[in-house]
Image (cartoon, helix red, strand yellow):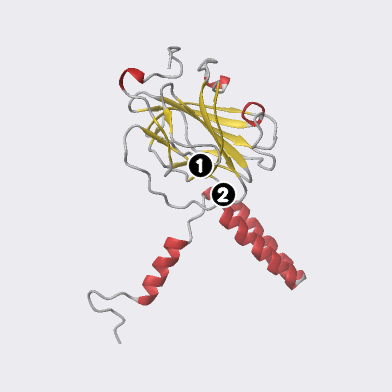
């Protein structure tokens, strides 16, 4: 007996499977070792004591959920920087960019997004362009919502040069619980706005430094959606300037 459906009709099982794929986001590859380790521990616990196995199963499911990497639709609009992370805008202030990038000490507008353990923890690229420089610096593990976290905590910084010549800085900052920063981009890589480039494990912060003349579109306390929320309008024409040029905003 044939299982083919008539033209224009939908196979219920196929439709259900598609709904499941659309609802349950895929997992970032960096999370697979943690999930596999939790699953193995769950099996061992279950053999010792069944209730412990149930708790282990819940922990395994939570771990898979933590490392989720949901699909996002990035605005196809020129001249904007999108949010590099899901979370809450903790600060909009001026600060010098990380010294390891060699951009000087001139203050730039910095938008800081704080991530709790409940937020999506992959980081997204704020604009299309080229990775001009990456720099990792070890440091402390203060709570990521503190002002000192940007200067004192372990971090991974990248300098992104857009196709329009703007220079943006994105910094992944470890938090009180976070102990591992993952980044998959290298100097010279060509990158696209909204694409995933890294991950911070278990609580963190992401700083975005904007070129002079940018117009910030978010406020402290606002929630951002990585790759989708427009954080700033980048300068155009005479207002455009790179962080290292030293001119006035």
Q: Is residue 239 above or below residue 141?
A: above
Q: Quadrant of residue 157?
A: top right
Q: Quadrant of residue 97?
A: top right
Left or right: 156 in relation to 179: left
Residue 186 at what x, y percent from top left? 47, 31
| Residue sitting at x 38%, y 44% | 74
Residue found at the very far left of the displayed protein: 7
Which residue does the numbered mark 2 point to in the structure image?
Answer: 119
User: How many numbered discs?
Assistant: 2
Residue 165 at what x, y percent from top left? 35, 23
Q: Quadrant of the N terminus?
A: bottom left
Instruction: Measure the alpha-carbon separation of dots 2 and 1.
Output: 9 Å
| Residue sitting at x 43%, y 12% | 247
Q: Decide: marks 2, 1 in contact (CB < 8 A)?
A: yes
In primary-sequence order, the first of circles 2 and 1 is 1
167 or 114: nearer the eye?
A: 114
Q: Quadrant of the C terminus?
A: top left
| Residue sitting at x 52%, y 15% | 104
211 or 102: nearer the eye?
A: 211
109 or 33: nearer the eye?
A: 109
Residue found at the very far bottom of the displayed protein: 1
Secondary-structure class at tag 1: loop
Secondary-structure class at tag 2: loop
Residue 158 at what x, y percent from top left? 50, 29
Left or right: 182 in relation to 240: right
Q: Tag 2: Cα neighbours inside 10 Å, few (<14), some, or many (≥20)?
A: many
Which residue does the numbered mark 1 point to in the structure image?
Answer: 85
Residue 40 at what x, y percent from top left? 66, 61
Residue found at the very far right of the displayed protein: 48
């Amino acid at each position: 007996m044939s299982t083919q459906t008539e033209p224009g009709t939908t196979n219920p099982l196929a439709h259900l499977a598609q709904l499941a794929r659309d609802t349950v986001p895929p997992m970032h590859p960096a999370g697979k070792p943690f999930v596999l380790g939790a699953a193995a521990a769950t099996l061992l616990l279950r053999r010792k004591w069944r209730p412990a196995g149930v708790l282990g199963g819940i922990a395994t499911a939570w771990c898979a959920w933590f490392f989720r990497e949901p699909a996002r639709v990035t605005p196809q609009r020129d001249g904007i920087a999108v949010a590099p992370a899901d979370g809450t805008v903790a600060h909009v202030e001026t600060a010098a960019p990380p010294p390891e990038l060699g951009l000087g000490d001139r203050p730039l507008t910095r938008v800081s997004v704080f991530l709790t353990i409940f937020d999506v923890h992959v980081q997204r690229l704020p604009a299309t362009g080229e990775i001009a420089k990456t720099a990792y610096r070890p440091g402390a593990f203060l709570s990521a919502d503190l002002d000192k976290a940007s200067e004192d905590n372990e971090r991974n910084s990248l300098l992104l040069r857009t196709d329009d010549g703007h220079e943006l800085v994105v910094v992944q900052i470890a938090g009180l619980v976070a102990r591992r920063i993952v980044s998959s981009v290298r100097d010279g890589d060509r990158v696209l706005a909204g694409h995933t480039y890294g991950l911070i494990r278990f609580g963190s912060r992401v700083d975005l430094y904007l070129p002079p003349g940018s117009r910030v579109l978010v406020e402290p306390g606002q929630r951002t959606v990585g790759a989708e929320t427009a954080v700033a309008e980048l300068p155009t024409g005479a207002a455009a300037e790179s962080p290292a040029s030293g001119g006035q905003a």
